[in-house]
Structure formats: structure tokens, C-alpha cells
Amino acid sequence: MPFSKVFFVNVSLLVTLSYLVNLGYKYTADRFGWWTAMSARAREALVVALLVSAGWVTMLFGLQINESMLFDLRLVPVIVSIFVFRRASLPLLVGIGIGLVRLTLGWNYAALAGFFNLSLLGFAATGLSLWFRQTQVGYPANFVISLLAINVLNAVNLSLFGAIPSWIYVTTIMPYTLPLGTLLSALFLFILRDFYLDRKRTGELRATNRLLMRQKKELERAKAALEEQARELRMASRYKSEFLANMSHELRTPLNSIITLSQLTADGHEGRFTEEEVQYLGIIRASGEELLRQINDILDLSKMEAGHLEFHHEEVSVHEIAQILEHTFSWAAGQKGLTFSVTAAGDIPEIIRTDGARVHQILKNLLTNAVKFTEQGSVGLDIRKEHEGPGGEAGSWVAFAVTDTGIGISRDKHALIFEAFRQADGSISRRYGGTGLGLSISLELAKRLGGHLGVESEPGKGSRFTLYLPVHPEDDQRSSS
């Protein structure tokens, strides 16, 4: 039948036109940016013009029965407009536009009937668009309803207002054109939906790429800002370290003079001072030594934060450490009426490789705290060999355990006491004094020496701080291998 041939030609033309439009958009819109540069109204006007042009092409290659009668798929762009536009009034413009271009193919009654028919179809498309927005019907239902409604309405209009008598149209033409038009309209819309989904996916990918590019640029800016902040922090840390180093040097000189002179004066007074005045000299010396220790702690903390604290690994005698600490703290413990003892297991290694000065610093901090926070009872240092570290690390370890019968620490404060400037109880600093830096520095030093520092304590039952040090640090093992 000639109707089927014409309709197939129309569908082919519409598919070709859609493909060319999609191709042009795909390769020029993003490259030249003309689509995004246009306003929303301009884009709508362009799409309306394209749909009207598509209707004109179908009429141009339609079936002409006589000088006035045309059969084609001009209604397909009207159906498409229902799904293309967000504004419901635009399908009406498409219908009226196709009706107007029908007049360019001949001015007669059939052309006027075609204009009237397309205008009615435009009104119907606008009504369907509004109805779909109100009912929120899914796409498949919208597709079927639009397809049937526009094709049936077109057939009714042609039977009532067309140039062919109604009875002839209904009995001889409509049985072919209505099912063929509906079927081929559905085929075109299905193909167009694939085009639309492909374009949508491409658009989403481009949008994702643009978003990723923006995020990449933002990350680069953030990275640059962080690097600048890190540089400023390094500079600030270096300035702080230099300031503290200079200040500590300036403070140490007069403090050492005060400590030395007060000691010399107390030792050689030869009866010139009363016992009370000698005690005052002792207080001056002890206060100066405490202040000097706090200055050293602050300087060490600053150096550790800046990564400038130096370590010198050497062979250190464990028994020598024990003897020095026993000699140093026996007198201090005796002054408070405490029993002080140092015990060493028989299997401890004679020599370990570590930084002896830092080990002394850690143990002096621990023993100083033990004496300070113990009012009665005992303080002890127990040295033993361990074949496993506190975290299950294999190897040879030496454990230095400092125990006391002092005030103890609640379990929930065990982590808190190792933070800089923090103590288990704020009232402790007022009662016993101190900055709260000793344990923080000791923990960091232990880590830098490849060891661990742990605590076991309960309120009222004393404390046990254990320093674990490897006999041979890992870095020395790697260098020797």
C-alpha cells in the first residue's frame, strides 16, 4: 500500500533528522559552548523550530492523493514535544507552527483543515503535558496515552474536517493510516528515547567530568593552602624552638649560678649562719634545681615537636644505670622517710645499645614522680629481662619498673597523664607542684628509643611505671645486617 511506504519514508526521515541533530549537538555543543551560552528561552525556541521543521519535512515527502490531500506523520513532532519541554505551553506552539508551514505547500481547504487539525493536536498535547505533571504518571503510561490520544484525535479530526468525505475516509483510508501511523509513531518515539537516553548519559558523564575537574582544582588549591600552612607552621615551630633555646640558655646561666652559690654558701658557712638560714639556702637551691628541670622539660618538648631532638646510641651499662639512680635517689627518699631499693635480676644483659642520657632522663622523671607522690611506704626500681615486649613484640628487652606506694591513679586517667601539661587531678599540681610535662616527655623519649612506657595503678594502692627498652634497637640491627 502507498500509505505504508510513505509512513516508512517519514519515519526514516525523522530518524535521520534526529540522528543528525544529536550528532551536531554531541560534537559542537561542548566543544564550542554555544548550547550553554544560549538562554533557556533561546534553547526552547531552537527546539520548537527543529520540531516544526521535522513536521514540514514529513509533509514534503508525504503521500499526495490529489492536488490538495497529503498523508504523513506530521503529528509525530507534536507527540515528541510532550516529552521534550518542561513548559506545557510549548507543545501548542509546535502544533500551530506545523499547521502554519502546511500552508506553504498550497493554499486551499485541505491546507486550512490541516492547520486547524494541527492546532487542535497542539492544544491536546499541552493538555496531556499538564495532566502528566499533576498525576505524576510513569513514562511508559505517558508514552502509550500520548501515542493513542494524538493518533486517535488526528483520525477523528480528519474524518470530521478533512477534505475527503467522512464515510470514505473512515471506510477506505483510516483502517490503514490509523494503525500504521500509531505503530510507526511508536517506533520513532522508541528510537528517539534511545537517542534521548544516550544524550542524557553523555550529558551526565560530561557533568561528572566537569564536577571532577572542579573538585580536582579545589583539591589542588586546598593542597597548596595546606602546604603553605605547613610551611608557616614549620617556620613558626623553628622560631619557637630557637626562641626557647635562646631563652633556656639565658635562664640556665643565672640559675646555675644561684644553685652553685647557694650550695657553696651552705657548705662553707662555718657557723656564720643559723640553722634556719641554712635551711633557706637549701630551699633556694632546691627551687632553682626544680625551675631548671622545668626549663629543660619545656625545651625538650619543643625540640620533640619540631623534630630537632638528637639521640646518640651507644653501649650503656645497665648496672651502671642502677648504681647512679640508687645513689641519686636514696637521699631524696630518705628525706621523706621512704624506703628506697634497686633490684636487678641475675639474667639482665650487662650492656644495651641505646642513648644513655635519655634513659637516665626517663627514669629520673619516673623516680622523681614516685618520690613526690608517695607520703609513706617505699619506692623501688626493679630491672629484669623480658623475652617479649608489651605489645607481643619478639626479641630481647630490658624492663625498668618504678614502683611506689603513693596516691595512685584511677584507670580512666591512665592515658590522660601522658598528655603534655595534664595531670590526673588538677588539685595535684597545686598540692605537689609540677608542669605535667615529665610523663609526656618520657613517653615520647621511650618511643624514640624504640621502646614502650606503660602504667599500672589504682587509687590508694600505688603505681608501677615500666620502661621497656630493646637490647638491640631495630635500626642497629638493620645497619649491622
Image (tube, rainbow, N blue to C red):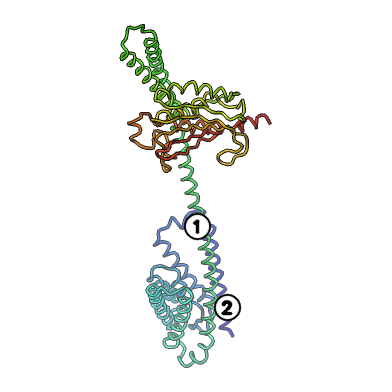
Q: Which residue is mark 2?
A: 8
Q: Secondary structure at mark 2?
A: helix
Rendered residue at 58%/41% (across/down): 392
Q: Position of residue 425 (x, y in %)?
A: 36, 37
Q: Nearer the viewer, residue 23 or 429?
A: 429
Q: Position of residue 103 (x, y in %)?
A: 44, 76
Q: Position of residue 266 (x, y in %)?
A: 37, 11
**Three-letter code for the amino acid on which mark 1 is drawn:** Ala
Mark 2 nearby-residue class (10 Å; few <14, some 14–19, many ≥20): some
| Mark closest to the chain's N terminus, 2 or 1 | 2
Q: Secondary structure at mark 1?
A: helix
Mark 2 vs mark 1, foreground winner is 1
Residue 63's image quarter?
A: bottom right
**Three-letter code for the amino acid on which mark 2 is drawn:** Phe
User: In this image, 430 relative to 382: left or right?
Assistant: left
**Which quarter of the image is occupied by the N terminus?**
bottom right
**Which quarter of the image is occupied by the C terminus?**
top right
312 in relation to 404, above or below: above
Q: Position of residue 114 (x, y in %)?
A: 44, 80
Q: Nearer the viewer, residue 344 or 429?
A: 344
Q: Which residue is mark 1?
A: 29
Rendered residue at 47%/88% (across/down): 164
169 in relation to 290, above or below: below
200 in relation to 316, above or below: below
| Residue closest to the far right | 481
Mark 1 nearby-residue class (10 Å; few <14, some 14–19, many ≥20): some
